[in-house]
Amino acid sequence: MIDLRSDTVTQPSQAMREAMARAEVGDDVYGEDPTVNRLQTTAAQLLGKEAALFVPTGVMANQLSIRLHTRPGDEVIVESSSHLIRYEGGSASALSQVQLSCVSGDRGLLSLKPVQAALRPKDVHNPPTTLLCLEQTHNVGGGTVYPLETIKGLTSWARENGLALHLDGARLFNAVVASGISAAEYASHFDTVCFCLSKGLGAPVGSMIVSTQDNIDKLRRLRKMFGGGMRQAGILAAAGLYALEHNISRLKEDHDNAKNLALHLQQIPTVFVDPDRVDTNIVVFEVVRSEHSTAELLQAFKESGVLLNAMGERMFRAVTHLDVDGADIEKAAHVLGSVLTV
Ligand SMILES: *Cc1c(COP(=O)(O)O)cnc(C)c1O
């Protein structure tokens, strides 16, 4: 089976498992796990921030950050197809009692004018707008990379207007590898930045939040409150350290594989895809003519050995990652071609 549903499906490699087995551990709620501490120091340095916190999931990283930056009744500006609005179970309203204001972007990327229009004037009728969240790369947008200039424009305007800034950088390192811009440069424009160890970086579990020491101290207390304080978590942190040391630069292979898949899909007459719009490791394509429903097509792909996710009516997403190689991509393209050409 060639599994292109997500880069979350990656399996820890043998070498990563060995690093996990060797990890020195302690009780991380007491701050005594040396491997977690090393991961946190490494992540903070890599992103040019004072401190970092290891958390179980990307959703928890986002939700702790929202809780940190807001008070109940505040409003948070997000992009309308962002992970925060679509895939986090309504947690911002449930856990932080904030209202999300959705602004549409181009392939998930916000521009300044509509964001400016979403800022509420200070008035007793209005919720105070206190936080702007961006997503890099943008998942539903198709792995799109925010240009640095756009980030600078949005964040400097937001700062002038007193908003805090959070980056959902679940796939930040895909953007780093695709653009050649450092993680620290991207991170310098935000108060809090999170990224996933468990996607293309190949670790089994975990996300990081980076920020100032003061914010990380507060986030540490919030993490305990949200139930995310872990004990001998060095076993997991060792996988994260291994991922940061070995699996960043190889993301380029995933990007090349995604581009190659898109070029193959473009040859199928019933498929619409624009390979020029494949910035990183996500290919979104549409089947423009078919007698079959989205679910039937997914089933037919699966029966021929390829797993994909649906993104809408006959819209599909293929995500490349470290457990699929160039030959798998050729095979997957062939399978999709034969299913869609009958
Ligand atoms: C995967 C993802 C997350 C976090 O998801 P978890 O499954 O909780 O780790 C957050 N934001 C984006 C954009 C993602 O793709």
Image (cartoon, rainbow, N blue to C red):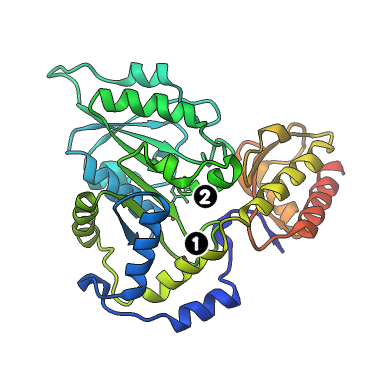
Residue, x 26% and y 66% (percent of image)? 229
What numbered label is drawn on residue 57? none
Residue at disc 1, CB closer than 8 Å to ligand 1: no
Residue, x 42% and y 45% (percent of image)? 184
Mark 2, secondary structure of its residue:
helix
Q: Position of residue 238 (x, y in %)?
A: 44, 72
Q: Amino acid at mark 2?
A: Phe
Q: In which quarter of the view is residue 153 placed?
A: top left
Distance between the alpha carbons at the discs numbered 1 and 2 = 10 Å
Residue, x 79% and y 40% (percent of image)? 263
Mark 1, secondary structure of its residue:
helix
Q: Which residue is mark 1?
A: 244
Side (left or right) of 191 relative to 247:
left
Q: In which quarter of the view is residue 76 placed?
A: top left
Side (left or right) of 2 relative to 5:
right
In this view, the residue in front, 276 or 246, is 246
Q: Position of residue 336 (x, y in %)?
A: 79, 48
In this view, the residue in front, 64 or 180, is 180
The relative height of residue 50 versus residue 21 in the rendered view (above or below) is above
Q: Quadrant of the C terminus?
A: top right
Q: Which residue is mark 2?
A: 173
Side (left or right) of 318 relative to 97:
right
The relative height of residue 203 versus residue 135 in the rendered view (above or below) is below
Quick one: label 2, few (<14), some, or many (20+) residues within 10 Å? many
Among numbered discs 1 and 2, the one appearing first in the sequence: 2
Report if residue 161 is visible in the image.
yes
Q: Position of residue 79 (x, y in %)?
A: 42, 31
Residue, x 52% and y 64% (percent of image)? 245
